[in-house]
Image (cartoon, rainbow, N blue to C red):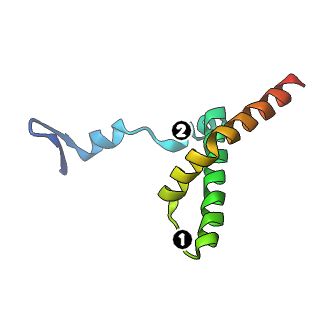
Amino acid sequence: MVKIVTDESHTLDAETAAGMVPHMSDNDSLLKGSLLYQEFLAEREEILRHKWFQSEKVGHDIGFEKALLDWIVRHRAAWRAARREQFRKETAR
């Protein structure tokens, strides 16, 4: 039996530990349909687009973290405001 040590005084067997972790497939449709998840994906896509443009400018890959921080500082507020306005227009119909 495989034991997983959680701290000095506790251990779990692998079967018990596996049962404690929810399976993503059980919640996939709920997760993928949520507005929060859709917004996360849209924001991530914008960050990746920003990463590509900035990497092209400097001639090498700038990395996700640098692109993320740069995008947050330069573009996030305006992007979110535009998304909110777009959402308001769509829900007003």
The front one of 68 and 7 is: 68
Q: Residue at x 69, y 40 (%)?
A: 78
Identify the element where label 2 is drawn. helix
Q: Give the farthest residue toward the top.
A: 92
Residue 42 is situated, as x and y percent measured from the top left of the image, at: 67, 46
Q: Give the farthest residue toward the bottom.
A: 59
Q: Residue at x 50, y 64 (%)?
A: 63
Mark found first going from the N terminus, 1 or 2: 2
Relative to 72, say whether 59 is above or below.
Answer: below
Dots 1, 2 in contact, CB < 8 A: no
- Quadrant of the rendered image containing residue 67: bottom right
Query: Which residue in the structure is indicated by mark 1?
Result: 61
Residue 4 is situated, as x and y percent measured from the top left of the image, at: 19, 46
Query: Which residue in the structure is indicated by mark 2?
Result: 26
Q: Residue at x 64, y 72 (%)?
A: 56
Counting other residues with Cα less than 10 Å from the Cα at mark 2, is it few (<14), some (14-19), or many (20 or more)? Answer: few
The front one of 23 and 77 is: 77
Q: Give the farthest residue toward the right.
A: 93
Residue 32 is situated, as x and y percent measured from the top left of the image, at: 63, 40
Q: Residue at x 78, y 31 (%)?
A: 85
